[in-house]
Image (cartoon, grey):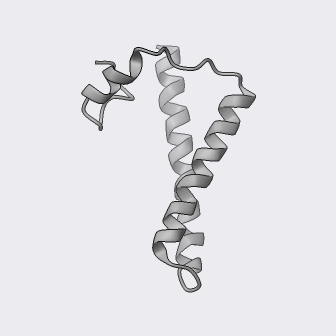
Amino acid sequence: MHSTATGWGNGLLGVIIFSGSLPATRVAVGGFSALFLTSARAVIAALIGLAVLGLLRQARPQRGILPRLRSCPSASWSAFPC
């Protein structure tokens, strides 16, 4: 139960941090294209995520998990294992 609650908490924190870049994006749309800014937000979030995983020395997922994730509904595969 503890790891589930921690996972939900970390996910919520990530969503809050990612949504914090939205106001800056609205201001920047005047000078850049919306597609570029949306892509930049996603790339920056991915790089921060990779850095955090590296700093915490998280183990890589097992090789056989990817096919299972592809067969799960996209809205629930991170919360409920298939």
Corner quadrant of residue 71? top left
Position of residue 67 in the picture relative to residue 3 (left or right): left
Percent coordinates x, y for residue 55 in the rendering: 75, 30
Task: Specify whether residue 80 is in view.
Answer: no
Residue sitting nearer the eye, 2 or 39? 39
Percent coordinates x, y for residue 8 in the rendering: 47, 30
Residue sitting nearer the eye, 63 or 23? 63
Hey, which residue is sitting farthest right in the picture? 55
Percent coordinates x, y for residue 60 in the rendering: 57, 20
Identify the residue at image location x=52%, y=17%. 3
Identify the residue at image location x=46%, y=16%. 63
- Exactly how many numbered labels are in the figure? 0
Position of residue 82 in the picture relative to residue 64 (left or right): left
Corner quadrant of residue 72? top left
Identify the residue at image location x=50%, y=47%. 15
Identify the residue at image location x=65%, y=30%. 53
Rendered view: 23 above or below 61: below
Task: Specify whether residue 9 is in view.
Answer: yes
